[in-house]
Amino acid sequence: MVNTDPRDELVIHLPALRAFAISLTRNGATADDMVQDTVVKAWTNIDKYEAGTNMRAWLFTILRNTFYSSRRKAKREVADVDGIFTENMAEKPAHDGHLQMADFQTAFAKLPDEQRETLILVGASGFSYEEAAEMCGVAVGTIKSRANRGRKRLAELMFLDEDGPVELTDKATVAVVSSNGSSAF
């Protein structure tokens, strides 16, 4: 008795597998992909095939299961031919945020103490100008002036466009840089 490797028998069944795949998918290219997936699965799981049993039936079962798995998966997927949904789901890379935060911290450290203090109170902490003025023991106009000068200097140091969007990673940082204290995301 000749002991043959079951992998050698796979090639014999390719035409029948393709015909079966075409009958399921009604598309030649999809059928070819299904046959390829089936052969890969059979090859990687050849140890599960019982020698002496019907190889064709085993392959057809793998193909059928692959077909129905792909159908179930397709029901959960959303067609996005133009990439519109994908564009809206994009997320900025984390390294951009780290770099922007480092730039912000460097620029923020260059501000005079009074401007940093004011921007932290009014911008990041969300206190009103009046509350910040009371905490610092100065006039409201002084706080407004410090905040304005601090934001202007930050924008210069960070090369931010005055009218453009502020693309920083966290809302507190945006509030410090932004004159209206709101996020520009």
Image (cartoon, helix red, strand yellow):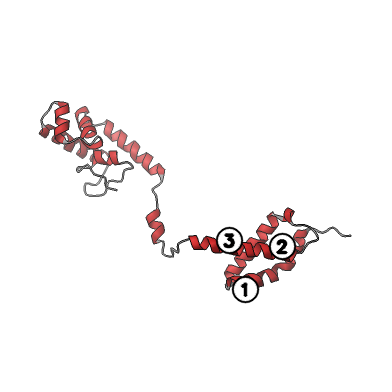
Q: Secondary structure at mark 3?
A: helix
Disc ID at residue 49 = none
Instruction: Using the numbered discs, state the Cα–Cα distance from disc 2 to disc 3 in whole angstroms.
Output: 17 Å
Q: Quadrant of the N terminus?
A: bottom right
Give the residue number, with chain letter if any, for mark 3. 69
Answer with the quarter of the image where residue 173 lies.
Answer: top left
Question: Who's the residue at 66% across and 73% down the image?
Answer: 19
Give the residue number, with chain letter if any, for mark 1. 23
The residue furthest top is: 137
- In the image, residue 22 lies at what x, y percent? 62, 72
Q: Secondary structure at mark 2?
A: helix
Q: Around disc 1, counting alpha carbons within 10 Å, would you say few (fewer than 14), some (14 to 19), or many (20 or more)?
A: few
Answer with the quarter of the image where residue 85 lies.
Answer: bottom left
Q: Secondary structure at mark 1?
A: helix
Instruction: Using the numbered discs, state the Cα–Cα distance from disc 3 to disc 1 in whole angstroms.
Output: 16 Å
Give the residue number, with chain letter if any, for mark 2. 58
- In the image, residue 183 lies at what x, y percent? 26, 45
Q: Is residue 3 left or right of residue 14?
A: right
Answer with the quarter of the image where residue 10 lies.
Answer: bottom right
Q: Around disc 3, counting alpha carbons within 10 Å, would you say few (fewer than 14), some (14 to 19), or many (20 or more)?
A: few
- In the image, residue 161 lies at what x, y percent? 24, 47
Question: Who's the residue at 72% across and 68% down the image?
Answer: 13
Q: Amino acid at mark 3?
A: Ser
